[in-house]
Amino acid sequence: MEAWLERLMQGIDPDAPDASLQLFLRLMGLIDWWLLFWLTLLFVAVGGLIGWRRGTFWRDVGLAAALGPLGWLVSFLLPLPERRCRACGRRSPARATACVHCAAPLSAGARQKARQPK
């Protein structure tokens, strides 16, 4: 560790006013930014796939972009979106077109389809 710090500080005067900036720029030069960019895109794509399957696409893309693979875990820990049925007051999955408890239509589109005679 000492040898690494000495090599990092080589050519930098610790008493100079811009020493911290020079040290920061040297540290940032050690990072492979392209690798981080492509990994972030991969994390966002996987988060999008998880969100697409769960019905929470944009939430999971945001979690993956902000937290990386930890966002995937957070996505699985958060509850799925739900809607409240106007007829019985119970909760049904957001993707459902009819209440799973009383079979009443949940959306305006579903109500119109149910009213149309066949």
Image (spheres, grey):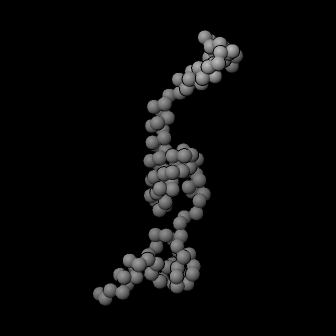
Residue 40 horizontal side relative to residue 110, left or right? right
Residue farthest to the top, as pictured: 11
Q: Please name whichever residue, 96 or 111, is drawn nearer the observer in this view of the structure.
A: 111
Above or below, 45 against 92 in this view is: above
Closest to the observer, 95 or 66: 66
Q: In the rendered image, which quarter contains the C terminus?
A: bottom left
Q: How many marks?
A: 0
Residue 28 visible, this angle: yes
Q: Does residue 113 appear to the left or right of 99 in the view shown? A: left
- Locate the N terminus by quadrant: top right
Q: Position of residue 52 (x, y in %)?
A: 44, 58
Q: Nearer the viewer, residue 96 or 108?
A: 108
Residue at image location 52% in from the left, 79% down from the top: 85
x and y percentages locating residue 55 in the rendered image? 47, 62
Image-quadrant location for residue 19: top right
Residue 27 on image: x %, y %:
58, 24
